[in-house]
Amino acid sequence: MVNGIERPLDLLNASKGKEVLVQLKGEKQFVGTLLAFDIHINIVLDNAKEMDNGQAKKNIGLTFLRGDTIIYISPASTSLK
Amino acid sequence: MVNGIERPLDLLNASKGKEVLVQLKGEKQFVGTLLAFDIHINIVLDNAKEMDNGQAKKNIGLTFLRGDTIIYISPASTSLK
Amino acid sequence: MVNGIERPLDLLNASKGKEVLVQLKGEKQFVGTLLAFDIHINIVLDNAKEMDNGQAKKNIGLTFLRGDTIIYISPASTSLK
Amino acid sequence: MVNGIERPLDLLNASKGKEVLVQLKGEKQFVGTLLAFDIHINIVLDNAKEMDNGQAKKNIGLTFLRGDTIIYISPASTSLK
Amino acid sequence: MVNGIERPLDLLNASKGKEVLVQLKGEKQFVGTLLAFDIHINIVLDNAKEMDNGQAKKNIGLTFLRGDTIIYISPASTSLK
Amino acid sequence: MVNGIERPLDLLNASKGKEVLVQLKGEKQFVGTLLAFDIHINIVLDNAKEMDNGQAKKNIGLTFLRGDTIIYISPASTSLK
Amino acid sequence: MVNGIERPLDLLNASKGKEVLVQLKGEKQFVGTLLAFDIHINIVLDNAKEMDNGQAKKNIGLTFLRGDTIIYISPASTSLK
């Protein structure tokens, strides 16, 4: 997945349809399937779960997340390398 | 509802007239019917209720919410999947 | 009042001359008559009262509120539905 | 003073040369004569006094206040209505 | 110095070469000679001193201050009126 | 690496493909290989590790970091000079 | 160095290649040689050291600092005047 990442948004584009881990300011963390994003890093996740210490705490399903609150977005498949 | 979401605002558009859960910074949470939104993610909710641990704490009726304070917006019908 | 709200600012427009409840960041709350607003959600209230647990704590009369500090604006007549 | 307020800045314009109460984020409060303002709500006060519970705590004279830190500006003459 | 202040930046312009008191967010306070400013309210002070309860705590000499952190700027000569 | 740094982004450009230390607001720290950045200082790191007192605490693999939360970015090879 | 400072960025320009003290929000402080800056006050320091009460705590070498977190930048040679 590393090949072809010229600009930061290329990683988000390559992650569409895949599971991502999203870290928000204030310690909130979500896991879900990345459906869409825009240049403000607003994103839509499907099957979003709010996480607590690696455990799903709450299912929030389909959700719109404002980019302003996001610290990082990581494709889940890469986090165990 | 997942089909046809190309951009994040598509989810908000598909949620018009439906009940949504809105999480604000600082732990405030609202449930209400999404009537309108703009590119700043300013929204209008009808029958808005301020929630406390999943219980309606206060009815605030029709309300304008500034996008700046919003963390996520989720259509309520998807949160129990 | 719900009819005709296509965009969030339509609610503010429909609330001109009416009493609104304004929630600010940091728990401040005001009630007053909405006289004017702009696209930054700067507003002018007449007969503004700073509220404390639903009681008027302090009369500040005519006042200019910067949009940046506002969380929500709700027409008072709808909050008891 | 209510007549003729079409836009929020009209109130600031009508308050030029008059005493205003300025509430800042973080509980600071000033009273002074409004000399000038701009669209960022940067303002200049003359005879500015930093207030503490309604008492003048410190005279800071002529002062430039950045709009970014302002919550509200209220003409002092209207606050006792 | 009040005469001729039409816009907030006029006060900063009139204060060039004079001693000013600069209050920052988070209680930091500086006294120094205002050499320059721009529309972002970035400023340069000469002979800047960080103040603590009205006493010079630390000399930082010539310094560039980012406007973003500034609450107010007051010409020192006016603060004892 | 110092030669040829005319503008701040030149350092980020010279650090592509190299290991960098990224300090975020709120004490979070990451080490990883810088793959991409943009003018908002959004970056992509490969083999990113969240650090705790100089020790890798958690592997998050490939990750997109929003510029808004970044304090500094330092090429790791220079930090032991 | 005071002569010729018409605009705030003139001081940064005059400080290129010289040692500067950089104060960040949240009490972090750096000393290093200023190599580059831009209009967002993003800067690059060489031989940057994180300071703790005037003592070097940690060498971070060559580093990119985002302007957003900076309170002030002062040429070190002027701080002992």
Image (tube, coloured by chain):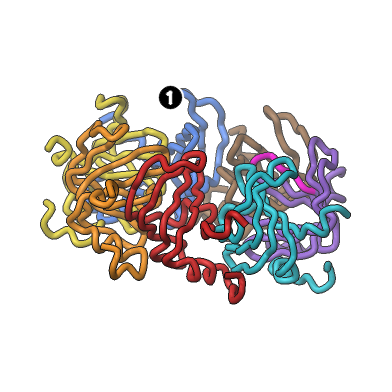
Chain colours: A purple, B cyan, C red, D orange, E yellow, F brown, G blue
- Please, is residue D46 above or below residue F56 in the view? below
Q: Relative to residue A18, is residue A10 drawn left or right?
A: left
The amino acid on which the numbered mark 1 sits, given as a three-letter code, is Gly
Which residue is at 59% across, 69% downward?
A: B38
The image quadrant of residue C6 is bottom right
The answer to whether D72 appears left or right of C72 in the picture is left
Does any portion of residue G16 appear in the rendered image? no
Q: Is residue A13 within the magenta segment? A: no
Can you give x and y, in whole percent of width and height, for residue E17 in the image? 17, 47
**Which of the pair D31/E32 is nearer the observer?**
D31
Where is residue C66 drawn, in percent x and y? 41, 55
Q: Which residues are magenta?
A: A26-30
Residue E38 in sight in this render: yes
Side of A69 relative to A29 (left or right): left
| Quarter the C terminus of chain E occupies | top left
Q: Is residue B38 above or below residue G49?
A: below
Residue at image point 58% right, 55% down: C79
Indicate the position of residue E6 as horizontal and vertical percent values: 19, 62
Residue at 71% in and 34% down? F51
Residue F25 position by quadrant: top right
Is residue A28 shown in magenta? yes
Q: At numbered mark 1, what does the secondary structure look like: helix, strand or loop? A: loop
Q: From what the image shows, is residue G45 above or below residue B17?
A: above
Q: Residue at x 23, y 50 (%)?
A: D77
Q: How far from the left and from the top, in percent, is residue D74?
A: 31, 51
Q: Chain of mark 1?
A: G
User: Is B6 situated left or right of E54 in this image?
Assistant: right
Closest to the observer: G44 or E15?
E15
Q: Is residue E31 above or below residue B62?
A: above
**Category of crowding for the residue at label 1, using alpha-carbon neighbours closer than 10 angstroms: few (below 14), some (14–19), many (at least 20):** few
Instruction: Identify residue for label 1.
Output: G54
Number of labels in the image equals 1
